[in-house]
Every structure is written in structure tokens, then in C-alpha cells.
Image (cartoon, rainbow, N blue to C red):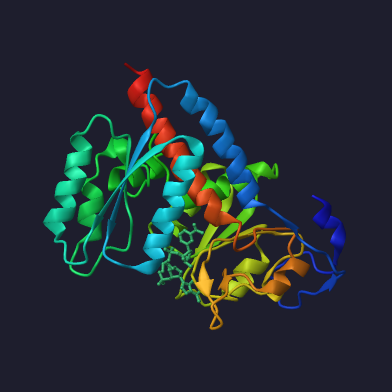
Amino acid sequence: MGSALGFRTLCDNPLHHNIQWERLHMTAQLIDGKALARSMEAKLAERIRALPRKPVLAVLLVGEDPASRVYVRNKVLACERTGIESRSVHLPETATEEDVIRQVRAWNEDPTVDGILVQLPLPRGIDAQRVIETVALEKDVDGFHVGSAGALVTGREGFRPCTPSGVMEMLESIGYELRGKHALVIGRSNIVGKPMAMMLLEKDATVTVAHSRTPNTKELALAADVIVAAAGRADLVTADMVKPGAVVIDVGMNRRPDGRLCGDVADDVRDAAGWLTPVPGGVGPMTIAMLLVNTVRSAEMRLLAQ
Ligand code: NAP
């Protein structure tokens, strides 16, 4: 990577207290998630043309959360662009857990449905985990089912969660070799941080996971070749935490007080990182692209196996 040329290391051990880098200004190369997502959609469209019918993604939205409505709309639009049929059901805020589960079960039994997505968060009083466990494993295109999580941990076939899968595609798109590298994942949620750590491990990186109780995140970050920030805290990762030339993946989606969308990575990281994902236009579009990939894969397994 060209980034290695942008600094001179005065101290070989990045964990050393007296670490000093003589920083020559560098500008990170951006990994364009939107462009990568569009090129993946084009490839999926070709695969879809080889199927006897369109893949079908069933999408359940419950309640009136405005952010969830936007996410669902973006997923439906991506389906339309690619040639996937989406079937959306919107239940009111007052829907019960049983109402939600009944809808999921109906889709489980419908042979024309390939993937089921339950948009989270669900309204208070509905046990999201119970709903997710109701989704048939072979239609769990979000990869949140405990069976999908178990498959990931044990290295078996299964649907992988979309956000960390999108991050892996982005790393692959720049030809980044993870083997032997030190990766730091900031965040340990079931949908991003933990599966992210597993996927990096699967590719032979040495992985550290930081969370809100980690006292030395900065020190860990300075030792990392790859940082995946998924904490949901604006400006959590600053330039002084980044080893010059490191790859910095910004999963965070936050709103500044003025309403602007931002990630977890501060603007000045551009001057330290070798590669950086933008927000918006980075991990977000790739998350949706991976949902489409999982849906098409599910349809292929159902339709081409017959
Ligand atoms: P989450 O469930 O709230 O988890 C956040 C994680 O970050 C937790 O593990 C938390 O630690 C950790 N954390 C919080 N503050 C921290 C700090 N100061 N230092 C280190 N760790 C800290 O969130 P999530 O669902 O994983 O999502 C994370 C972010 O990614 C959010 O901004 C979300 O909007 C975004 N996201 C984006 C996409 C996309 O497509 N771009 C998809 C999913 C999520 P504890 O476990 O100790 O509380």
C-alpha cells in the first residue's frame, strides 16, 4: 500500500509509551462503498436472470420509527434496482409479539419467499430475539438467528450478517491481505462487533475487541493495522489513535446536533489512515448489497436445487 511511504517510524513498538511518529501529511484513499455496492448489484442482476423466477425478500416493519422507515425504503429500492421482488408488511405500533410471529411463520411456510427481514428495533414489549429465532434458518438473510451465529462461530455454511460481510467485501476490494495483521473491532454487538471479529479471525487476522469498558482503546488502536469502528459514537476514533497507513472502516451512523450524518471516525483520520470508508457512502450501501447477495443465494439454493 502506498500509505507506508507516508510516515517514518521512530519507534518500532507501537505500544511503547514514547511512541513518536514523524507524520508527513498523507490523505487516506477512500473505499467507495456506494460504487462497490452498485457493481455487486449489477452482478446479482445477471445471476437473477438465470433463475426461473425472481427472488423474493419479505420485509416486516412494525411501528413508526422514522429511521426504520428510511432503512426499509432503501432496502426495497435496492431490491427493485436489482430485480428482487420485495413484499413489505407494515404492522402498527400496537401489534403484539404474537402478531409479529404469526406474520413471520406465514412467510416461513410460503415456498415463494426466499428471505425474511424483520426491521429492528421492534416496539417495546416485543422480544426481538424471540421473533428472530422464529425466522426459518434457511430464510435468515439478515444472519441474526442463533443458528446463523453458531454457523459463523464454528466456520460452517450459513447466512453471515450483512454489515460485517460488507466490510469484508470492502477489504477484499482493495486487495487487503488480513493474514497476520492485527485488527481492532470497537463494539461488541451481536449484529456488528461480534460477527465482525469472527469474520476477521476467519481470515487469519489477530483480533482484539474493544467496548465501553475497555480502558486502553487508544493504545490498542495504535497497534492495529485495521480498525473497524462500530460503537455509534461520533468522533470516537481520532487521528492520534491511528497507526499511519492503517485501514479504518467506519461502521458508525450518528447524527451531529446540526442534523448531519457522521460515523465514529473523526475527520482528521484522513490525514493518518491509508484507507478509509466514508460516511455516508461507505459501509451503509454495502450492508444493503450484502442483504441482496444473501437473498439471491437463498433463492438459488431453493430454485436450483430442485
Ligand atoms: P450497539 O448495539 O449500540 O453497540 C455499540 C457497541 O459499542 C457496544 O458493544 C458498546 O459497548 C460499544 N461502545 C459504546 N461506546 C463505546 C466507547 N466509547 N468505546 C468503545 N466501545 C464503545 O450498536 P450496533 O448495532 O453494533 O451499531 C454500532 C454503530 O454502527 C451504530 O452507529 C449503528 O447505527 C451503526 N450501524 C451501521 C450500519 C450500516 O449499515 N452502516 C449497520 C449497523 C449498525 P458495550 O457492549 O460495553 O455497551
Left or right, 293 with respect to 263, comes to left
| Residue in view at x 37 percent, y 47 percent | 142
58 or 33, which is in the foreground? 58
Instruction: Say above or below: 79 vs 296.
Output: below
| Residue in view at x 66 percent, y 74 percent | 238
Measured from the top left, where is residue 218 in percent x and y?
A: 62, 74
Query: In the figure, residue 299 lies in which quadrant?
Result: top left
Query: In the figure, residue 265 lies in which quadrant?
Result: bottom right
For the question of whether residue 303 can be seen, the reply is: yes
| Residue in view at x 43 percent, y 33 percent | 296
Left or right, 85 with respect to 268, comes to left
Instruction: Say above or below: 205 vs 68.
Output: above
**Residue at the far top in the pictured view:** 306
Instruction: Say above or below: 271 vs 148.
Output: below
91 or 181, which is in the foreground? 91
248 or 86, which is in the foreground? 86
Left or right, 162 with respect to 11, comes to left
Q: How many marks?
A: 0
In the rendered image, the quadrant that contains the C terminus is top left
Measured from the top left, where is residue 61 in percent x and y?
A: 29, 56
**Residue at the far bottom in the pictured view:** 257
Measured from the top left, where is residue 140 in percent x and y?
A: 32, 42
Instruction: Say above or below: 22 vs 49.
Output: below
For the question of whether residue 199 can be seen, the reply is: no
Measured from the top left, where is residue 261 in percent x and y?
A: 56, 71
